[in-house]
Amino acid sequence: MLTSKIKALIKLVEKSDVDELEVSSWGSKVRIRKRISNNGNNNNRGPQVIQTVPDRVIEVASNQAAEIKAEIPAARKDNYLEIKSPMVGTFYRAPAPDAKPYVEVGERVARGQTICIIEAMKIMNEIESEYDGRVVEVPANNAQPVQFGQPLVIIEPV
């Protein structure tokens, strides 16, 4: 998640009566929590930001949200490849609700192997891997809508 978006979320929490806000986006999760002083007085509370990226947690505490100088690491390595949705539709990880998913995180996939289905206009479209590699992440949620160009599966080339 971009630092500018995190700053905007912090300002939102500071100006509201909300004590905690959690937002998930593209595999990263940010939790913003107002810090309460030891004496229980809420007048001295400042934001506390926790961003979770796969295999990493970053904590940033600040009295002024605009002064966040923490560098947020990239959620994915540069060499990872994304298989993106070629259409708008509903994403399915398996051929049937009770069936095993086409791919799981950590599995190897081959070019041309079916990795998911996208239902569009009552037609089930099998989506094939464009690459050989290992599945690192499946950011799309099962049985949820996906947009054109949205990442479905992240692959590390082998």
Image (spheres, helix red, strand yellow):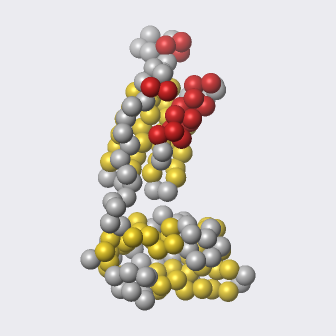
Image: 28 above or below 47: below
**Residue displayed at 49% across by 31% down:** 33
60 sits to left or right of 5? left
User: Residue at 54% of width from left, 41% of height from top?
Assistant: 5
Which residue is most to the left?
A: 158
Q: Nearer the viewer, residue 79 or 105?
A: 79
Q: How many marks?
A: 0
Residue 47 in the image: x percent, y percent? 48, 26
State whether residue 143 appears in this view. Answer: no
Quadrant occupied by the C terminus = bottom left
Image side of residue 93 versus residue 133, left or right: right
Q: Quick one: which residue is furthest to the bottom in this view?
A: 112
Residue 23, how many percent across, how many down? 54, 45
The residue depicted at 37 percent of the width and 51 percent of the height is: 74
2 lies above or below 136: above
Q: Position of residue 62 (x, y in %)?
A: 42, 24
Image-quadrant location for residue 78: bottom left
Visible residue check, residue 147:
yes
Is the residue 117 above or below the residue 71 in the image? below
Residue 93 in the image: state x and y as whole percent: 51, 76
Q: Residue at x 65, y 74 (%)?
A: 89
Q: Quadrant of residue 59?
A: top left
Quadrant of residue 48 in the image? top left
143 vs 138, left or right, is right
Rendered position, 138 above or below 52:
below
Q: Residue furthest right?
A: 121
